[in-house]
Structures are given as C-alpha cells and as structure tokens.
Image (spheres, grey):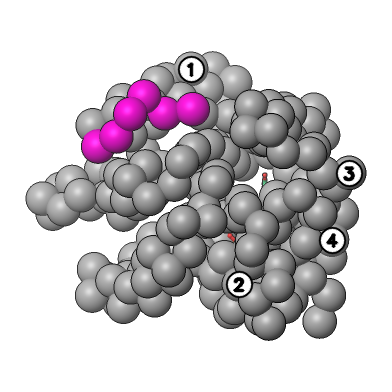
C-alpha cells in the first residue's frame, strides 16, 4: 500500500505524527497537506493502522484515533489509547513534531462532560503526554468551519486555557479542511520547524 513501509527504512527519518481522537479529521488533514488519498470516514475508527507517508526529509504518520467521540466510557477510550501511546513511546527518539488534531467545534462540550465526572479530558491529557515525548507539538484546531464567527475567539481562548493547564503554552493553528489558506498556514508552520532543524522542506 502506498506510503506504508514496515521494513523500518523510512523510520530512520524524523517523524511528523498526526494524532488525536477518532473522527477529528486527522486523515482529512493529511490528505489536504499531501494530496495522498488516505482513508477518510464519517464514522470513528476509519484509520485502523498508522499510515506512513514518505516525504523525503521526513515521514508523515497518520495515526488511528485514540478514542471515540462523545459518549464512550473512560475504560473503552483507555484501551484504544494504550496501544497508540505505546507506539508513540517506541518512536520517541525520532519524533520531531506531533500534530495534535482537535475538533474545536466539540472541544468545550467534551471538556465540560469529562470535568463534570472529575476526569481530565482526554484531549487535554494527550496534549500533556505529547508535550513530554515530542520535540515540538502543533495543535491543529480543526473544523473551524463548524464554529460560528462570533464564537471563534471564545472557543480558541478556552482551548488555549485548558491546554496550558497541562503543558507549555500551546502552538495553536486554526484549520479547516475546507479552507485552503488554513492548510497553507499549517504547512508553513511545519516547514519553519524543519528549517529550524536544518532539514529539507518536503515538496508535499
Ligand atoms: N466540517 C468539517 N468536517 C471535517 C473537517 N475535517 C474532517 N471532517 C470530516 O470529519 C470526518 C472524519 O474525518 P477523518 O479524516 O476520517 O477523521 P480521522 O480523525 O482520521 O478519524 P479516525 O481515522 O477514525 O481516527 C469526515 O466525515 C470528514 O469529512 C473539517 O475541517 N470540517
Ligand atoms: Mg483517520
């Protein structure tokens, strides 16, 4: 399958990993960034196995989602998450950038639900984890097209506040796969890190 190589060759290159809960739009973003036809689905759990895309100087990885969206209980989310956490830990030395994709149109609702049960919301916990294991973390606040303009600054402020509770001040890029300019912003941010690290910019 295109982009998949488990021989390990590609893995010697620095990794840029796209991670986050199920159905937040990870594969859609990978497709928008690269033009590669990774699988996209209406239901959570579409990406069953990580997809590696060789972009010469780096390998871009589309991860499976680590928990279903609204409604799933903590234990179910934890089981799904553990495998992904292990995979990322195994890659730690090569992990240059983690792109944490968050569905900003659902974020507040999910946070309020988890906090009402006295639990740390899974997106927030995962941000803390990625901040520990990855050299750089970019938060792609996706599905901005689903947030009303009048609510945007409130929702981004809320996201920033919640993530700051568990890690460094987040590097948040608002994106929507329906807005080419926002995809360009994300690409430019990735490229600026690669340049900073003395790596070639991919031709995407
Ligand atoms: N409105 C809107 N929908 C989006 C956006 N990005 C993705 N979607 C939709 O969200 C759904 C899930 O997209 P995927 O890219 O498959 O999500 P994923 O995070 O890869 O999901 P898993 O592989 O299951 O973890 C699809 O129906 C996409 O069309 C966006 O920016 N705006
Ligand atoms: Mg996917």
Location of ligand 1 given as a quarter of the image: bottom right
Q: Quadrant of residue 7?
A: bottom right
Q: Tell me whether circle 4 and circle 1 mark residues in contact (CB < 8 Å).
A: no
Real-space CA distance between mark 2 and mark 3, rounded to the nearest whole angstrom: 22 Å
Cα distance, mark 2 to mark 1?
A: 33 Å
Judge whether 116 appears above or below 195 on screen. Answer: below
- Asked if the magenta segment contains residue 170, the reply would be yes
Q: CA distance from mark 4 to mark 1?
A: 32 Å
- Where is residue 103? Give x, y as percent: 51, 46
The label nearer to you, 4 versus 1, is: 4
**Nearer mark to the viewer, of 2 and 1:** 2
From mark 4 to mark 3, how far is it between C-alphas?
13 Å
Q: Residue under circle 3?
A: 203
**Neighbourhood count class around disc 2 (C-alpha, 10 Å): few under 14, some 14–19, many 20 upward:** some
The magenta segment is 166-171
Q: Is mark 4 within 8 Å of ligand 2?
A: no
Alpha-carbon neighbours of circle 3 within 10 Å: few (<14), some, or many (≥20)?
Answer: few
Kindly tell me whether residue 61 is visible in this rendering: yes
Secondary structure found at label 3: loop
Say which mark, if any, is on residue 153. Answer: 1
Q: Which mark is residue 50?
A: 2
Task: Write down the residue under mark 4.
Answer: 36
The residue located at (28%, 71%) in the rendering is 78
């Amino acid at each position: 399958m295109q982009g998949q190589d488990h021989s390990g060759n590609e893995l010697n290159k620095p990794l840029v990993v796209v991670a986050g809960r199920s159905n937040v739009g990870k594969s859609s973003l990978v497709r928008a960034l690269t033009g590669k036809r990774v699988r996209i689905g209406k239901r959570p759990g579409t990406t069953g196995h990580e997809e590696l895309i060789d972009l010469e100087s780096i390998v871009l990885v589309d991860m499976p989602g680590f928990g279903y969206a609204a409604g799933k209980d903590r234990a179910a989310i934890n089981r799904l998450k553990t495998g992904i956490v292990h995979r990322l830990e195994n890659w730690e030395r090569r992990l240059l950038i983690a792109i944490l994709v968050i569905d900003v149109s659902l974020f507040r609702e999910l946070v309020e639900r988890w906090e009402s049960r006295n639990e740390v919301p899974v997106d927030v916990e995962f941000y803390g984890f990625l901040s520990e294991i990855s050299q750089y973390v970019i938060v792609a606040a996706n599905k901005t097209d689903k947030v009303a303009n009048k609510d945007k600054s409130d929702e981004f402020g809320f996201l920033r506040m919640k993530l700051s509770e568990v890690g460094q001040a987040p590097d948040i890029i608002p994106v929507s796969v329906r807005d080419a300019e926002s995809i360009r912003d994300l690409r430019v941010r990735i490229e600026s890190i690669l340049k900073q690290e003395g790596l070639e910019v991919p031709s995407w």
